[in-house]
Image (cartoon, rainbow, N blue to C red):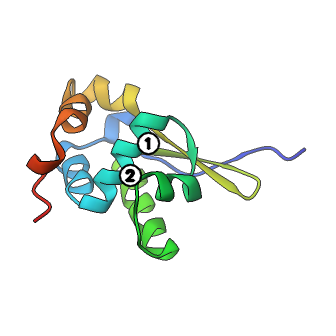
Amino acid sequence: MSTPIETPHPNPADLRLATVLAALADPARLSAVRALAAIGESPCTELQQAAGLTISRSTFSHHQRVLREAGVLKVRVDGARRMLSLRRDDLDAYFPGLLNAVLATAPERIGTR
């Protein structure tokens, strides 16, 4: 049995509000975060489907990278699977209430158009 490989993530102390907000500003990334919050840890392929995203796998991979580098997502590589989860504890510690406010915002208020 192989040991899971960890993907690099920013340290919690290096999280920046502007970077987190910029990552969450994209409608596809926000859809993925909302879906992930509802289902918990998920393989990336299932998250793309759960979020209802009809974008290419490479585009979704780009969105995952942006969210990971901003400190919103944690990616755990386990064999051929990339397991995604929200870094809710870190986000709540540094930006109290932000994630809950974003997730509670009605979809029509997001401003995707």
Q: Which mark is residue 46?
A: none
Across and down, in percent, residue 63 comes to 39, 63
Residue at figure coordinates x 25%, y 51% from the top left: 24
Disc 1 to disc 2: CB gap under 8 Å: yes
> How many discs mark residues in the rendered view?
2
Residue at figure coordinates x 32%, y 41% from the top left: 14
Residue farthest toward the right in the current orientation of the protein = 1
State which quarter of the image contains the N terminus. top right
Task: Tell me where residue 27 sits by quadrant.
Answer: bottom left
Q: Is residue 72 rendered to the left or right of residue 8?
A: left
Q: Is residue 40 rendered to the left or right of residue 92?
A: right
Residue type at the position of mark 2: Ala
What distance separates the C-alpha of mark 1 from that of mark 2?
6 Å
Q: Which residue is under mark 2?
A: 32
Residue at figure coordinates x 38%, y 30% from the top left: 88
Across and down, in percent, residue 35 comes to 40, 44
Note whether 43 is above or below 98 in the view shown.
below
Q: Is residue 92 rendered to the left or right of residue 106?
A: right
**Secondary structure at numbered mark 1:** helix
Across and down, in percent, residue 69 comes to 39, 54
Front residue of 2/52: it is 52
Residue 71 in sight from this viewpoint:
no
Residue type at the position of mark 1: Leu
Task: Tell me where residue 41 sits by quadrant.
Answer: top right
Residue 20 in sight from this viewpoint:
yes
Q: Which mark is residue 36?
A: 1
Note whether 38 is above or below 89 in the view shown.
below
Q: Residues within 10 Å of mark 2 (few under 14, many from 20)?
A: many
Note whether 95 is above or below 3 in the view shown.
above
State which quarter of the image contains the C terminus. bottom left
Residue at figure coordinates x 26%, y 28% from the top left: 94
